[in-house]
Image (cartoon, rainbow, N blue to C red):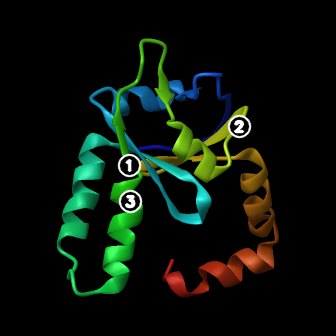
């Protein structure tokens, strides 16, 4: 399971260190893709295959299904960790996510997310207000 929040530098070649706690889950390969809320998602191969199977079951006649499939698959990048536990983030994905010299790596159960620090700070502010947070999750049945 992916959990926690970590800050890591993005080097000149576009590589970011993956938290050591995540590396075993990603050792067999991973996929980096554009994700919700303008961040990047990092999926272990198996989780990516499960998500892909769900998306394959969506009707091709549904324009929202096509939109989601195009967003995920067109920008996805299959890769591996290097020997130092880093992942290469292609320039196009870095630009789309607003990543420059630093990234915030978040664990989100079956995948990780990589955020530009300023975008994460802005998003996180909304979570800091307990009333706003309670309203946001009210209909989730938790």
Pointers 2 and 1 in contact (CB under 8 A)?
Answer: no
Q: Could you give the CA–CA distance between mark 3 and mark 2, rounded to whole angstroms?
A: 22 Å
Residue indicated by mark 1: 76
What residue is drawn where x is 48% and y is 29%?
A: 88
Q: What's the CA distance linking mark 2 and mark 1?
A: 19 Å
The disc placed on residue 72 is 3
Q: Nearer the viewer, residue 38 or 135?
A: 38
Q: Is residue 10 left or right of residue 67?
A: right
Image marks 1 and 3: residues in contact by CB distance under 8 Å: yes
Residue for badge 2: 100
What's the CA distance linking mark 1 and mark 3? 6 Å
What's the mark number on residue 11?
Answer: none
Q: Residue furthest front?
A: 92
Question: Which residue sits at x=29%, y=50%?
Answer: 47
For the N terminus, give its image quadrant.
top left
Please tell me whether mark 1 sits on a helix, a strand or a loop.
loop
Q: Considering depth in this image, is 137 or 88 the residue closer to the camera? A: 88
The residue positioned farthest toward the top in the image shown: 83
Judge by depth and name the residue closer to the eye, 76 or 117.
76
Q: In what element is the residue under mark 2?
A: loop
- Label 2 or label 1, whichever comes before in sequence order: 1
> From the viewer's perspective, is 56 left or right of 66?
left
């Amino acid at each position: 399971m992916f959990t926690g929040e970590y800050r890591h530098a993005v080097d000149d070649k576009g590589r970011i260190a993956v938290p050591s706690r995540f590396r075993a889950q990603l050792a067999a390969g991973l996929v980096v893709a554009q994700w919700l809320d303008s961040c990047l998602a990092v999926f272990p191969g198996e989780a990516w295959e499960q998500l892909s199977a769900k998306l394959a079951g969506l009707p091709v006649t549904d324009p929202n299904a096509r939109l989601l499939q195009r967003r995920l698959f067109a920008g996805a990048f299959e890769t591996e960790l290097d020997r130092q536990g880093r992942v290469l983030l292609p320039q196009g994905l870095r630009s789309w996510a607003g990543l420059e010299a630093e990234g915030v790596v978040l664990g989100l159960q079956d995948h990780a997310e990589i955020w530009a620090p300023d975008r994460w700070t802005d998003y996180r502010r909304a979570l800091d207000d307990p009333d706003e947070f309670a309203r946001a999750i009210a209909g989730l049945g938790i």
